[in-house]
Amino acid sequence: MRSTLRMAIILTAIFQTLPNLAFAEGKSIYGADNRIELFNASPETYKIADSVVSLWSSASVTIDPVAKTAVLSTVNFGERANLCPGEQFREQPIGAFCSGSLVGPDLIMTAGHCVTDAEKCKSTKIVFGFAIQKAGGVPTTKMAQSEVYACKKIITRFLGREQGPLNPAGQTLGPDYALIQLDRKVVGHKPLPVNRTASLKKGDKLMVIGHPVGLPLKIAAGASVRDASKVGYFVADLDTFGGNSGSPVFNTATKLIEGILVRGDEDFLDSPAGCTTMATYAQTGGRGEDVTKISALESFIPKLKASSKTDSFQDVKMDGASSDGISQRLAPSKINFQ
């Protein structure tokens, strides 16, 4: 697994001014680093990424009601982590503590350890558009106030080590998820469709979109399912880090959400040079990254109606108007993921 003490020391150094960053185990790079910026994505992936969000502490988001703008408070990744020269994204800002995706008109899907209770919900802001939009551009840390939402309430939540039907006896890990309702319906972004067929199998190709280490949005493909046999989650070789928790994981062939990134291998390693490097493994090495299966919570997600059989995203419409009518099933938490 990982060195818990070393990981704790590194994360404390990185996020001493960002106390809400959520980690459920570490996450890491497998084979080549496949993470790319938003502006390098294909047009179809670019549209999908428009519905992926970053989660922030309310204290890190400053709203100017007169100018109707929002400013994100960030720190330099390389400086905070003592990263070695040449490390990927070293000079970029970090600040988000988790990722998520829009799956209903006012419904965000994320990891259960990201929004743990009503108090955490109250202190969380959900932000669209924290990304580098064009080549040579800078990360968007100032945006329209309308791109920032508040967490109204937790619709349903489950944390991966609770015992129960989603985590049977003999299996030490399980699904980890939360659905949260926003303070208002989202404008300008479309809900993403999920795979309701439970057809995922070993070798299926995957893509993840989110905010590794709280960085501006990154897209990482080139991954596949290692083990789909677990109850409530599957294992894959996705290039992810803490901060990716809650990221939607897509089937690259169908562009449907297959699950939520929740756990993985070690994030960082100490270099003999006295600086920090990102942990890397062979494509088939390491423990792999755990992804909550969408089947664990898809019954809580409102269905989308596509305009045609071949159109999986561009013109989806909601089958139902609001998340208020979704039944609540809030499981008590026994594990506090840091």
Image (cartoon, helix red, strand yellow):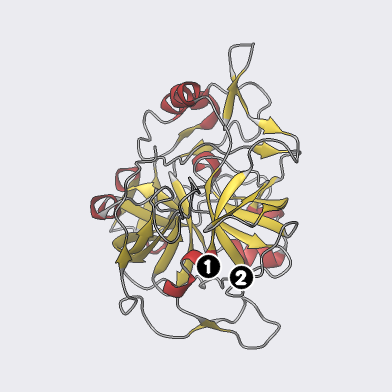
Q: Residue at x 36, y 31 (%)?
A: 17
Q: Of helix, strand and loop, which one carries label 2?
A: loop
Q: Quadrant of the N terminus?
A: top right
Q: Front-most of 85 and 321? A: 321
Circle 1 Cα neighbour tier, 10 Å, few/some/many (<14 / 14–19 / ≥20): some
Specify the label residue 280 is tagged with: none
Q: Residue furthest bottom?
A: 308
Percent of width and height locating residue 219: 64, 52
Q: Of helix, strand and loop, which one carries label 1?
A: helix
Q: Front-most of 78 and 277? A: 277
Percent of width and height locating residue 333: 31, 50
Circle 2 Cα neighbour tier, 10 Å, few/some/many (<14 / 14–19 / ≥20): few
Q: Are the residues tagged 2 and 1 within 8 Å (C-beta)?
A: yes
In the image: residue 305, left or right of residue 105? right
Percent of width and height locating residue 76: 50, 31
Q: Residue at x 42, y 42 (%)?
A: 22
In the image, what residue type sits under mark 1? Ser
Residue under pointer 2: 198
Q: Residue furthest left?
A: 119
In the image, what residue type sits under mark 2? Ala
How far apart are the two marked residues, 2 and 1, measured between alpha carbons?
A: 7 Å
Vertical side of 313 occupied by 174: above or below = above
Residue under pointer 1: 295
Vertical side of 301 occupied by 259: above or below = above
Vertical side of 60 occupied by 293: above or below = below
